[in-house]
Amino acid sequence: MSEQINEEMWEEVYVKPVKKVGMITLLVAAGLTFTPLIYLYLAHGILPPMDAALRSWGLVAAAFGAFYIVEPVSYYAILGLAGTYMSFLSGNISNLRLPCSAMAQEVVGVTEGSKKGEIIGAIGISASVLVNLAFVTAAAIVGMAIIGVLPEIIVEGFRDYTAPAIFGAVYGQFSMRYIQLAPIGIGIALIMLGIIQAPAWLAILACVFGTMGIARVMFNKDIIKGD
């Protein structure tokens, strides 16, 4: 009975307010993206032809549409509900919000997907948004001046290897927990991208759900142990 009450309290106190605020803020942000277009039309009478707008939208949807489904599903276990809303509103999900959420939960010692993990992950993401805002502002002011004096090889290194380094750190972090699954995730990625040469969104789906499926089988056979 107490567990049922806790679930009901969790739903009322946390889940419903998060959904309400999250949907409102995302819809407001989506509406504000049209502000430049509205300004150009009201101030200068400029409006792109409908066929050109639809073609542009089609190109963007073809290139990134699959990620609208893939990324929320793939990242939800670590980001949590509130973290998902905040991350998709603020951006930089895979290279900043996801590692911050994962590291916060790792440091505190909570399990991803649990209620404690949900709250700790949201706190980590909130902190990352504030820190990111401060450093992005500073970078916008002085960043280009600093980059301008660095050797080209260092600039190229930052550009080409920062994201892989972050992904590698997150991969290593979770591989240490379930070392048996580490080669499986890498193996699926190598097959999908190197042999089959599947598009990135399909490779992500295969890696996420393929690893989850194999992990479930290994768990049922007592090859790996859950937390």
Image: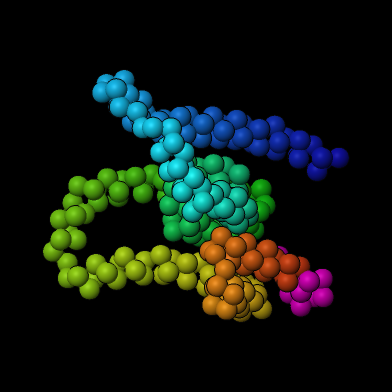
How are the residues colored?
Answer: rainbow
Residue 83 falls left or right of residue 130:
right
Q: Residue at x 29, y 71 (%)?
A: 157
Q: Main secondary structure of the magenta part?
A: loop
Horizontal and vertical percent for residue 81?
A: 61, 44
Q: Residue furthest top?
A: 42
The residue positioned 80% from the left and 43% from the top of the image is 3
Horizontal relation, residue 225 to residue 105: left or right: right
Q: Quadrant of residue 223?
A: bottom right
**Residue 204 location, quadrant:** bottom right
On the question of residue 33 being in view, the answer is yes
Up/down of 196 relative to 144, above or below: below
Residue 206 coordinates in the image, percent (x, y): 64, 66
Front residue of 204 and 60: 60
Quadrant of the drawing holding the C terminus: bottom right
Q: Position of residue 23 (x, y in %)?
A: 57, 33
Residue most toward the right?
Answer: 1
Left/right of residue 154 with respect to residue 211 in the rendered view: left
What residue appears at the point 38 percent right and 44 percent down from the top-left corner? Answer: 130
The quadrant in which the N terminus is found is top right
Along the viewing direction, whichever of 64 and 96 lies nearer the viewer: 64
Q: From where the camera sits, is residue 176 visible?
A: no
Q: Which residues are magenta?
A: 217-227
> In the image, is residue 222 part of the stretch drawn in magenta?
yes
Residue at horizontal 48 percent and vertical 57 percent from the top:
94
Residue 76 forms part of the magenta stretch: no
The percent position of residue 187, horizontal first and vertical second, equals 61, 78
Quarter assignment of residue 185: bottom right
